[in-house]
Amino acid sequence: MTMSAQGDHMDGSNSTGCGVPRSIIFAASPHGYLILDTDFVIIDVNDRYLSMTGSQADDLVGKLLFDAFPDDPADAAADGTNNLRRSLETVVANGEPHRMAVQKYNIPIRDSATGAFEEKYWQPLNSPVFKDGKLIALIHHVEDVTSEFLGRRDQAIRLNLAKQVSGIGYGELDLLTGTANVSHELAELFGYPDTEGTMPVAKLVERVHPDDIAEVNKKLEEAMARGDAQAVVNADYRIVLPQGDIRWLNTRGKVLFEHGKPTRFIGASIDLTHSKNREEVLQRTLVERDRLLEQKETLLGDVNHRIKNSLHLVSSILRLEAASVSDKNVRDRLQQASSRVHAVSSVHELIYKSQNITRVDIGEYVPQLVDFLSTSTTSVDKKIEHIVDAEAIVLSTDMAINLALLINELVTNAHKHAFTQREQGRVHIRLHREDGQLRLIVSDDGLGEVAKPGKEGLGSKIIAGIVSQLEATMNKEATEHGYSVVIEIPLQTR
């Protein structure tokens, strides 16, 4: 041992405050330590380290660390010396301790005639030693975690199938040295089959899609900048496999800090390719659906426009024909037919203007229809006032057309029969919801009867047919000031 000499050299003292030589404390420490100079030559070692590595002091002291512990030549993937060198160089450059991720670093069996190596896993911590502000040595502290690591293998084997089924891979990135310790599943996700353990982070990064690298780096940098327990990364990104195939991954994990600086990232990744492909198919389907619906809306809007124009033309022809007929009975019938056609036509016009091919606001439509009826049915020698009280109710197109015909017939009947002996009068049209029903009331202040006794007219037949079709009820009654028709239509089934 040379700790005594090194103790004198490094701090000028060979004893602790209680008079115990530092060399004795160093030798008896329960943890394994190597003391290295700045060229990584071993200048001292304690008993625990010798015991863990099966070495003698003469095997180590005075030798370059990587000559005393070379990579296992039988392990093609061995990279322990390279990773350890990077960590030590980082400590020299930064002047701060660096804790490495668990490393597989096989060590030579000293008394082996064949130069065999023993499989070992270590948790290393490398720290600087300063004197008068100058770096004079490095402390290499290791914990032998081989038994723990190998003990977890059984559990890992039991979980392996579940991992493969779920497509989850785990990894740890050393942010200072650029090395990664990855599970077999994670390596396979990135297109490195039959790989497990340490590998350069650059090999993972080179697989990330060029268009996604900036976003992944941004999320990692944001987490590193937080510097607290909330330094979480959650990123979706693409990787490009060697054959050119695209795989979607989601990586979630946390950044760990030492001495206030980010040193490691521990995370898990899952294959999202199937989900992303389904999302893309769904998105394309939705886009196509929207295109077809828009096309349908356009076509049906055009159909409504054409129907409206055609019906308007028919209504105009009937009205012109009525004007040219001298027989009053025929003229009245042609005018009534024109009004009925116009009632349907006006619904299609409202549909076309509203850009809604299936629904109509009846509260907006009824006043327009009554205005037309007022103009077309009131003669110069009579002044009939029309009062409309219509609630804003959105109904299906079919229901709106039926209501249009009902209102047309009821208002026309009031004009035709209620004011035969009067020059003035009033027709009140009310439409509102009540107890789950649509309630239409058409009343007048006329003679108190709908028609003179006789054969039922076409208008009455049309009203009865529509009431039956809508499964509605109709009540007609003479009032103190005229006549009233109340039609109640159930809405819950409409």
Image: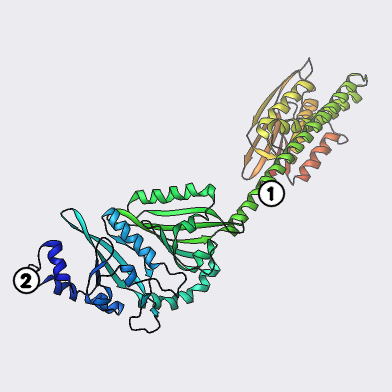
Quadrant in which residue 19 is drawn? bottom left
Gap between marks 2 and 1 measured at Cα: 99 Å
User: Residue 107, percent across and down?
Assistant: 36, 75
User: Residue 278, percent across and down?
Assistant: 62, 56
Residue bearing the label numbered 2: 19
Left or right: 367 in relation to 246: right
The correct choice, above or below, for 335 with respect to 45 in the image is: above
The correct choice, above or below, for 6 with respect to 28 in the image is: above
Say what amino acid the circle numbered 1 marks.
Answer: Thr
* Residue 90 can be seen, yes or no: yes
190 and 224: which is toward the camera? 190
Say what amino acid the circle numbered 2 marks.
Answer: Gly
Left or right: 180 in relation to 145: right
269 and 432: which is toward the camera? 269
Tell which tag, 2 or 1, sits nearer the viewer.
2
User: Residue 180, percent across and down?
Assistant: 42, 62
Q: Secondary structure at mark 2?
A: loop
Which residue is pictured at 78% across the width and 33% down the height?
344
Which residue is pictured at 44% across the width and 49% down the height?
217
Near mark 1 (Cα within 10 A), the count class, few <14, some 14-19 or many ≥20, is few
Per the rendering, the mark at residue 493 is 1
